[in-house]
Structures are given as structure tokens and as C-alpha cells.
Amino acid sequence: MDHETARVGGRRLVATSAKVEKRGRRRRRGPLALFVFVCVAALVATITGAASPVVGTRFALVGHWVYNSVLQVAFHIDGATANIDAEAAVPGDPGSQVVQGETSGFVVGSSRITEFGKSTLSVEQSTAPPADEVPAGLEVPGGPYLVYRAAGKVVRLGEPPATLSTGGAVGDPVSTSDGTLWLYRVGVGLVCRLSPGADRISSCPVVAPKDHTGALTVVGDRPALLDLTTSTVNSIDGDRLGAAVPIGVSVSPASRPAANDVAGRVAILDPVARRLVLADAKDATAKPVTVTLPDGDYDRPVSTGSAVALVDRKTGTLLTFGADGMQKDSKPVPHESGSPRLSRGEDGRAYVEDAAGTHVLIVDRDGTVSDVAVAGKPATAPTASGQVPDPGATQAGEQRSDQPAGPRPGNRPTTQRPPTSTRTPGPQNPPPAQKPPPAQKPPPVPASPPGAPSSVSATAGDSSATVTWGAAPDNRSPITSYRVSWPGGSTTVGGGSRSAKITGLTNGTRYVFTVTAINAMGTGPGASSPAVIPKGTPTITISEGGRMTSDNCKAPDCHAVNVTMKGFAPNTTYTIVLHSSSNNSVWRERETTDANGNATHNNGDYDVSGETVWVTVTTSSGTVGSNRITWE
């Protein structure tokens, strides 16, 4: 039996496998859980008489690996607990990403792809990437895969490893749960398929108009083509395109969909229109949800299945939204050293890491965000062979502190004779008591970036909000300032401040404010306030609309009364009363405001020319009246 030993979270684990299969310098590891599972399955098969072997056994890849290029360490983050539970010292390039398979992780940089064992947490081998570009990484069964889109190359890092050609440039890849990769050939209109284990891309069965711009997504675990020229979605049924479903709004050719759907809707970022579109992929009559985004530079959206995440690379802001378009959270991402990276882990969560890999935000499936500071001891410099020495190993002439003092193996101890005494026998004074050596002071804990501020809250005002917070832990370096950020802006105040008034906000818009502390060591994790909606005095505007007819309103004088309400309480039903110069209560109708406190009501009508008309709405604070117009 062969044994493999690893340290995970400070504990020493030993995994036993019946066989270690070698391929060149690669070595497949059988995790202990898999070994036990197969043994139990064999026993059950014996008892029940089922003689067929257990095949296709696969385990979910929990969490996500990130690479801290400052420390030269890959860290594993448990997405459910937001804790770091393993780390591996791996040499790599600045800005490297990490993708994982079932037994190995891979640090992918601009000059090398370095494999490390997930059970041993040690470096195994390095290879050169096939192209000088940042690849799209996919963690799927049979993978992971790296797709070099401009070069038209696909690298399978799983078994069997291979570098495959797509025949030309491809767009953003997608995958289904069975491990099949789908690739859209740019400018050709072909949709190609790469099955798990295939040694070449031999099938491009789906043909789309080659003069159209398209992008792939997955809806309900089925691939679909978003035609950006016609603003339609076509499901891919086997070897052909399904019927085109209009998404209900025109999108630009620069738009990019998320790789998978959000509760059945396709999440589309349109950078030209500066909006996020959530479109039903199956129901052509369903109205799309559109979200206007703050001015910024946004990357491809990532879906958790129930929420969608976007990163503004210009301001370093993470935004999350539900399938209904409502904002779920907002958090800053350090972006001074480069653009943050947004990716989806195989656990279904989205992960945002800064360029250096020192800070990670985790987007849970419901869109809430948690913060992880990625830090640890600096990694030992790798040897010439690319291996990182064991921190517990000793150099020549040194003795490990965890070994007992005494002769070392291979050295014979010398026998010393006691010195001959020349003193006269007789009573002697006892030797003086030995003083214990002074206690060694532990080395001082080094300073680090501050912790998160406590008790962050916000109070809405008229086009403004006041944000308050508690002091953040300084972590042995005085806090010099606090940064308050929100979608569309940020401000910095002194380290002694505990509040900030934010002005210039848009009434009726939801805002989440995030506060981060800064000291000489860097920026700490952020803490966010609950969402607030600035609002001023509610206003109502009416106008004469298009022609209508009803039992009490006759053509040709009958027209709609267009009512626009702004700045009211959100999600609240109000009664609208129409008044005229001859009738104090022409009609009464009800309308409910949206999440921002706004509403539009176009169902009422009026038909008496020359009359002065207006509407009123009664709130808990009093009655709000509209402008007055003369009916024509």
C-alpha cells in the first residue's frame, strides 16, 4: 500500500490507495473518500449479487482556489463558511488564476501552468501555455479546461490531458452538467461541441447565420445561442437551432450573456446601453427586466442560478441583482493593482478576486456577499526544480526545534570521564541553585490591513443619505481613513470619522453603502449598510394622453389621463382621485408603487373639454396634489 500525506488546515492527513498509477511526471491520487466509497460499493455488490462495477463515480468540487501572487501561495476558500481551509506554496505569475480538477489544482499564468496535488499540496509539474492571452477557465467533469479564445485553442487539464484546436477564434465558452463544452466560432456561425474525453473537436453540428453576431449561454442545463443581431434566443436541440424567441428588447452586438441562466432568465450585459437585461428564454410574451447601471467598465456577468453578479472594473465595485432586477448587494473590490476577476466556482457561487489575489468576495446563491482577506506566511522560494521546500525541513548543520536535543543519527556520542577531584573528602556545600533562563518573549505580531467597520447603517434624506459606522480594528497600524462607496461614487473621510453625508443622489433609487478602513498596510474588508432609498417631497405629474373610450367616456373627446408618481413610499398602494372644475371626484382608482417608490397610471380617462383637471393622492403625511391642466 502507498501512503500520501498532506497538511490541511493545520491537521496532518494520510490518504491510502491500493495503487498509484504513474504517467510521466503526473500521478493520479485516489482520495480516501473515494477509496472508502468504492470498498463499500463492492461490499454492497457482493451482498446483493450486483456484479457490475461502480463506474462514473464523481464528487463535487467544493469551494474555490485563488492565487496570491504576493505570497506565491494558492489558497482554498470554502464558499459556504468563507474560511480558508488549505493552502499550497506554488510559484506563479502575477495575475494568475487557479482552476481545479478532482485530484489536482492548476495555477494558470502568462508564462506557465503549474499543477499541484490537492491531497499533497505540493507542486508536480509545469507546462507552457499555448498562447499569450488570458484564458477562460471552466471547472467541469472531465476538466478543468482552459479556452484561449483569440488563438482558438482548448487545453484539457483533466484526463486525458490534451491541447485541441477549434479551427479559429471562438467566443465565451459554456458547458453543461455532463461536462460537454460548447464553443461559438466567431465570424463563421458554427456552434462546436467537445465531449468529455474526446481527442479532437470533430463536431460543429449547429449552423447559425454567419453574418450575425452571437454568444452562447445555458438555460436549464441546455445550450442556447443568443443572436445579438436579431435580439433573439435559440435553444440548441441536438444538432439544430430551435425556434427563435424574442427577448423583448434590442441589445447591441457588444452584449455578453452570463454562462448560465438566472432562474430561467438570460442575464445580458449591454455595455453600450449601460444596462443589464434579464430576458425570459422560453416565453416570448414575458416582459424583460432591465436594470440601468452606473457609468463604468463592466466584465461579463456571472450567474449563481438565483442571482447575477457584475464587476465595474473602473471603480472596483461588485454589484449583485436578483432575477427580478432588484439589487441584492454592493461591495468594493481593491483594483489599484489591476482589474478584478469575476468567475463562477463549481459550487455555484461567484468569486471576485483582486489582481494580486489578496482579497476575495464570495457571492452566495441568493446574491449576498461575504468578504475574505487572503493572507498567510510568505512562501519559501522554490528550488531550481520548481519544487517548494517543506517549511519544516532543515538546512545542513541545523537541528529542527521539534526534535529532542541529543546526538544526531549517524554520530557516535563520545564518553567523557568525570574530572579527578583534588579536594579533601568531607562535608561540602551544595552547589548554588541554578536560575531558570529568562522567558523568551514571543515575536511581535506584524501589522496588517484593518478589519471591517462595525454597525454600518444609512439614513435616507432628500437626494442624500447619512452613513454611520463603528470603529474598525486597526490590526496594529493606525487607521488613516475610511472610504465610503456606493454604485456610482465614493468618498474618503479621516480615520477618526464615524459618519459621512452623501449628497447628489437620485431620489427613488436604492443605494447600498459600503465602508472600508485604510491604514499603512492597506485596505481592509468592507461592511455594507442595508439598502435605503433617498426621497424628497412626493410629486405627481399629469398629462392628456391618447384617445380612449369607455361606458362613461365617449369618443372623440375621451382621452387617457397619464399620471406619474415619484418619491412615494415603495411597494405601497395609493388611491388616485381625479378632480375637475365642475366635479370634485370624477373617479377614484388604485395604483401600487414599485421598489423605488414610483408609479405610472394610464387607465383613467376624461372627456369634458375646457375643464381644469388635476389629481390628488393621500399619504400618511398629508395630501399630494398634481399640476393642473385644461382639458382640450
Image: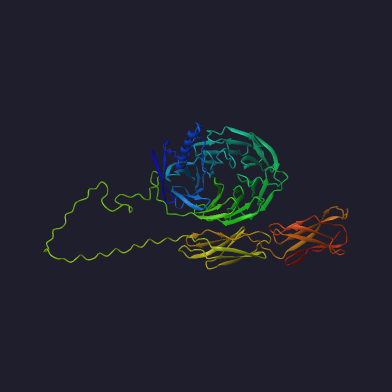
User: Along the line of sight, which residue is nearer the eye, 3 or 382?
Assistant: 3
Count of all numbered marks drawn on residues in the image: 0
Q: Position of residue 610 (x, y in %)?
A: 88, 61
Q: Position of residue 208 (x, y in %)?
A: 66, 36
Q: Is residue 93 depicted above or below 426 in this figure? A: above
In the rendered structure, the answer to whether residue 281 lies left or right of residue 119 reads: right
Quadrant the N terminus occupies = top left
The residue lying at 53 percent from left, 33 percent from top is 198
In the rendered structure, the answer to whether residue 120 lies left or right of residue 584 reads: left
Can residue 617 be seen in the rendering of this structure?
Answer: yes
Q: How is the image coloured?
A: rainbow
User: Along the line of sight, which residue is nearer the eye, 270 or 318?
Assistant: 318
Q: Position of residue 606 (x, y in %)?
A: 85, 57
In the rendered structure, the answer to whether residue 437 lies left or right of residue 56 reads: left
Q: Position of residue 130 (x, y in %)?
A: 50, 40
Can residue 386 be seen in the rendering of this structure?
Answer: no
Q: Is residue 537 depicted above or below 173 in this figure? A: below
Q: Quadrant of residue 241?
A: top right
Q: Quadrant of residue 581?
A: bottom right
Quadrant the C terminus occupies = bottom right
In the rendered structure, the answer to whether residue 295 lies left or right of residue 62 reads: right
Q: Is residue 237 depicted above or below 591 in this figure? A: above
Extreme residue toward the bottom, this view: 496
The residue lying at 51 percent from left, 63 percent from top is 472
